[in-house]
Amino acid sequence: MPESLTRAVRWDTVVGALLVVVLLLSFSFVDGFGNALNLSFLLGNTLPIALIALPMTLLVVSGEIDLSVASTAGLSGAVMGKLWNEGMTIETIIPVCLLLGVVCGLVNGLLVTRLGLPSLAVTIGTLAAYRGIAQIVLGSDAVTDFPTQYLDFAAGRVGDSFLPQAFLPFLVLLAIAAVVLHATPFGRSLFAIGASEEAARFAGIRVKRSKLLLFVATGFMASLTGVFWALHYASARYDNATGLELSVVAAVLLGGIDFDGGKGTIGGAVAGVFLLGALQNVMSLEDVSAQSQIVVTGVLLVLSVLGPRVAGQIAVVRAQSSG
Amino acid sequence: MTHPSDTGPTPVLALKDVSKSFGAVRALRDVSLELFPGEVHALAGENGAGKSTLIKTLAGVHRPDAGQVLLDGEPVAFHGPGDARDAGIAVIYQEPTLFPDLSIAENIFMGRQPRRALGRIDHKATRAATSALMRRLGVDLDPDRPASGLSIADQQIVEIAKALSFDARVLIMDEPTAALTGSEVARLFGVVRTLREQGAAVLFISHRLEEIFEICGRVTTLRDGAWIASEPVAGMTEDDLVRRMVGRDLDELYPKQDVEPGEVALSVRRLTREGVFTDVSFEVRRGEIVGLAGLVGAGRTEVARAVFGIDRWDAGEVLVDGKCLVNGAPSMAMAAGLALVPEDRRAQGLVMDMSIERNIGLTGLRTTVRAGLMDRGAERSRSLDWAVRLQVKYARIADAVSTLSGGNQQKVVLAKWLATGPRVLIVDEPTRGIDVGTKAEVHRLLSQLAADGVAVLMISSDLPEILGMADRVLVMHEGRLTAEIPRSDATEETVMAAATGRAAA
């Protein structure tokens, strides 16, 4: 295995192990952590991060990023509420919202691939723009009276277990993302693009088309998450999911996906997501304020960028001193 | 052959019985080397012979496992490149690392500019000191020019000036001429001779043997990490030197087979990319090797990029086997049977962090697939097959290509493209920066491909290579095709005349 790959794999394992440790400690020492209700809260609250983290992993592997995802989710929630108020059926509204997400992703993707702008800058811009549109669409209203069978699905559990019903579709999406990234030619080409866009182009890989596709997929998943969010919390507001992009990016980087592109695994990303979710849940149980939780997320973000590099440096120093 | 002796003048810098290993790889074994003031000393050897390790040991990057580094005859231990620099040892690399937005003067005195009162930088004194350095080197470069506009040759001269400003007594030049044109090399050699006359010791590394004979007084040869010989250049022939480097008589360097050309495989018609190249038309037949010569910047690489679809063309057309290619679509060009081995293997030819297996696999993403998923077994056997056929030297097929020597990296690029079974192969500087043994292998391979019916277009700045390998030579000058010379009429003079615009086709 190449040195770079073993390093990424090792970081995966580190995060996976860390997740196990945090879960074990939480089960043992945190009151109320282990009961079914709390676990279902944990999973339900983590699902939005997890859903967006899937396409985000592919995007970061290809060397790009999308910070507008939370705003896209908020916008699709707001449009959902607005159209519901207008009397449209939910069966029509949801496809419209998902299409809207595709358009949001398409805008990001075209700005990045056609105009050659850096995705960090583009999506900070659309982060503000999409959220602004959401506020124009819905104002300060909160729409809560969605059909009960939808609300029940989004908030319900599988039988008496702690598993949210929505977790099962997530597992399907997770499997799809894992197969696409790790077992298809497209996934293979993403690693090449992220590691060296120029070399990928010289190998006949359609770099721009691949990236555009990923932005569209990310927009789609973000709007799906927005729909889920509004139903799960039974509330469509323009500020739904505000700041979620921070959690998604922190989780993905924590999972060992290299911010510079070219390295990472879906497994690592998922471990990062649930590690972050577990920590946030424990902090809530211990009455840590929301503001402090954001501080912790931010610190994790910095550490997750730092961690693999420090590990890499240690490996280099070891190789030199043993050489 | 002279061994380091105890008598005579003291070398300014020497290695004595130095060994250095990296893991299981013994990069240097009991190597000795003496550099005297006022000499230009060549370091010769194939890629992987230990030249880089030797340079890094002299420059304080590596510490020897055994043996000594001697400065003015006294053992020293460098704890880093800074120590070596303070001792008057400077390394000039093939690709200089200047700050592009700063001026020449600011680059030279970065971090140690002369100061005026209150710590303000004294720009006047900086400029004056820079001018003095340039005069010493006998070159005319404006200290105020920003580094970004400088040619690689000028950037190297700035690096040399910077070294002198540190009072360097030993200059190590690592393949300084690899990216230079003929006249730039001549000017660089002028500077090197000036330095020699001023008493500096120069260690000179180049894969171009004729340069060693032109500029160097003595040559030390390494092979597989071991010291082979240190001897005067005078009286040696190129064959002698090659024999020392490869340890055997080299098969012919240009093993060109005569092949009867078949039908036209690649046809380029009136191809134009505005401001880059104009009205370029030529054909390459199956079985032919067509050389594309010209000075650096004449537009040869740009034509190849456009033909393959990396850049779009503005007018004209490209046909492979009579079928038009889509403008700006490398994937379609590949599907049509075109392959391009690009000029810059590290940035364009390879994904350096990826394994050998996956780099070769990148061109097979459409073929090593089963039911839409990667067929890893097929990918591995395809990569292994081609790595073995091209005799790539590697430890494991899953090692990153960055762990390979330059010559072996180039073989991986070739393997990656030959695995697509191309009908037309464009190679851009196929042997730049690779050792003479591998070079002969690449030439034999190209010749065999042509014999098997592949149409080969070979861009090269290495004139002997063009003359030795090409059935026909196309020459470009300032974005236009200026000559087409058949093998029988191609000489250095005819090609250079067309390349410099002194003769029309």
Image (cartoon, rainbow, N blue to C red):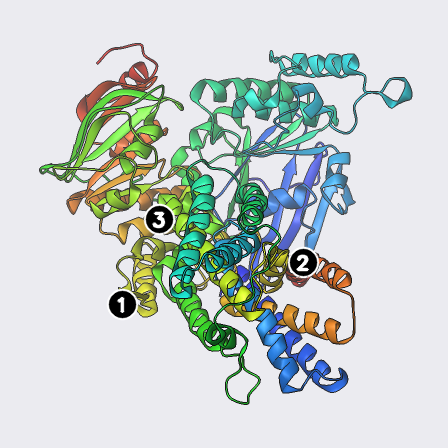
Query: Which residue corresponds to mark 3?
Result: A205
**Could you say where residue B87 lies in the image, as x and y percent from the top left?**
76, 35
Protein chain holding label 1: B
Q: Secondary structure at mark 3?
A: loop
Task: Give the percent coordinates (x, y) of residue B351.
Answer: 45, 50
**Which residue bears the numbered disc 1?**
B370
Q: Is residue A312 left or right of residue A148?
A: right
Dot 2: what SS?
helix
How packed mark 1 is, by other alpha carbons closer than 10 Å (few <14, some 14-19, many 20 or more), is: few
Along the horizontal axis of the image, is A103 left or right of B114?
A: left
From this viewpoint, is residue A269 visible? no
User: Which one is nearer the viewer's eye here, A52 or B332?
Assistant: A52
Tell me where residue B75 sits by quadrant: top right
Relative to B420, residue A170 above or below: below
Look at label 1 and name its amino acid.
Arg
* Protein chain holding label 2: A
Q: Is residue A256 above or below residue B112?
A: below
Which tag, 3 or 2, sits closer to the chain's start? 3
Residue that numbered label 2 is attached to: A301
Q: Are marks 3 and 2 on the same chain?
A: yes
In whole angstroms, how far apart are the C-alphas of marks 3 and 2?
31 Å
Distance CA(mark 1)–CA(mark 3): 19 Å
Label pair 1/3, CB-CB below 8 angstroms: no
> In percent of the image, x 77 and y 84: which residue is there?
A29
What's the amino acid at mark 2? Leu
**Which residue sits at x=65%, y=56%?**
A305
Q: Nearer the viewer, residue A144 or B503?
A: A144
CA gap between label 2 and label 1 equals 39 Å
The correct choice, above or below, for B174 with respect to A243 in the image is above
In-image side of A212 versus B8 (left or right): left
